[in-house]
Image (cartoon, rainbow, N blue to C red):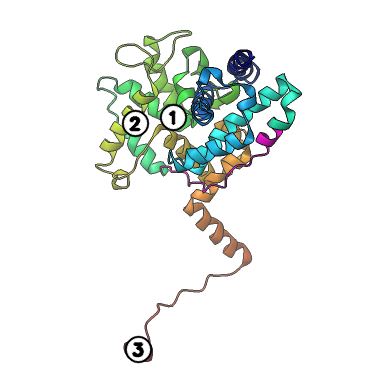
Amino acid sequence: MRRSNSESLLGLTESFFQSYLRHTRGASVHTIRAYRDALKLFYLFLADQKHKPIADLAVVDIQSESVLAFLNHVESKRGNSAVTRNCRLAAIRSFVQHLLRQDVTWAGQYGRILDIGNKRAVRRTAIYLEPEEARAVIAAVDPRAREGERDHALLLFLYNTGARVSEALAIRVCDLRLERPRQVRLLGKGQKERICPLWSETASALHRIIPTAKGEALLFRNARGAPLTRDGVAYVLAKYVRLAAQTTHGLAKRRVTPHVMRHSCAVALLQAGVDVSVIRDYLGHASVATTSRYITTNLQMKRDVLEAFWKRAGLSPAPLKKWRPSPKLLTFLENL
């Protein structure tokens, strides 16, 4: 009996990943990997807690108490943040919802798990480059150097489109339209397609690297002709950030990842006055709330809004008077 239960858990886990995540939901490779890692950690923890091999775990072992203990373990023993804890919980919730769709017999058990709430986490402000900094990084590329044309096209593409690195690496030549209207078709999270316009500068740079890859072939490739990897993109970007830091000192101590280029694109669009809902579609965000976080990170935009408010109200901000300590105050403090 126990063996059949464990086989049932294995079958349900396989159907969750193969049938539901891949085909029904159309989850990205990265989402599948994140859910895989979360369930793997949970099963290892559960097996240790139940003092049994993972092969003998059954559906009945997945209880709310065990999930709560696992989440506490993630934070206290593994040292993960509340954000990571919530991501692990999201994966478990999605799996439990799949279990509920397959068998309502354990509805009460599953319901208690689904009632477990996220832990409030401090959201970090988005790190981004100002337009002049992003341009300095792109200008650091020497197109005449080996792989220089590819690197120039890659950095321009990331900043122009705000594409996730996975989206950029999946681009094929057939996804591009380099004559007017210049645009690219991107495949984002959940297999959602979107069209992004391209600057003429970006289109020209992409056109120069097309002869090495045609049709269905991936556009961005390494020196050996193999598809460029995420680590490869990070290496290329870091190299030109170091070069640009020699003349643009604000870059010297910055850790600029490919996702920072995405944030930089979003902030530049906001600074240009583009509506948040348009930027949401441009970046492929599921919710405008995700896009709105960029407003809170940009101090210059806050200053501009405040100055516009004063001007609209017909007021002038009072000049600040420089504070000077009173001699009496200093005497008082010295006599304490």
Does any portion of residue 167 appear in the rendered image? yes
Mark 1 and mark 2 in contact? Answer it, CB < 8 Å. yes
Label 3 to label 1, Cα distance in Å? 61 Å
Q: Say which label, 2 or 3, has the lower sequence index.
A: 2
Label 2 element class = helix
Residue pictured at 68% horizontal, 39% vertical: 115
Q: What residue type is labelled 3?
A: Leu
Q: Between residues 306 and 311, which one lies in front from this camera angle?
A: 306
Question: Given contact means CB atoms under 8 Å apart, are the residues at marks 3 and 1 in contact?
Answer: no
Q: Is residue 315 above or below residue 173?
A: below
| Residue 31 image position (x, y, % from top left) | 53, 25
Counting residues from the start of the chain, the first of labels 3 and 1 encountered is: 1
Q: Residue 336 shows which numbered tag?
A: 3
Q: Is residue 125 magenta?
A: yes
**Nearest to N terminus: mark 1 or mark 2:** 1
Write down the residue under mark 1.
158
Magenta stretch: helix, strand or loop mostly: loop
Classify mark 1: residues with Cα within 10 Å, few (<14), some (14-19) or many (20+). Answer: many
Quick check: marks 2 and 3 in contact, CB under 8 Å? Answer: no
Residue 153: which quarter of the image? Answer: top left
Q: Give the range drawn in magenta.
A: 110-129
Local packing at callout 2 (Cα closer than 10 Å; few below 14, some 14-19, many 20+) is: many
In the rendered structure, find residue 237 and report the number of the disc placed on it. 2
| Residue drawn 32% across the image and 28% down it | 235
Element type where label 3 sits in the image: loop
Q: What element carries label 1?
A: helix
Q: Can you give x and y, in whole percent of width and height, for residue 291 in the image?
A: 57, 40
Determine the image quadrant of residue 259.
Answer: top left
Residue 322 location in percent, x, y?
Answer: 40, 77
Q: Is residue 335 above or below residue 213?
A: below
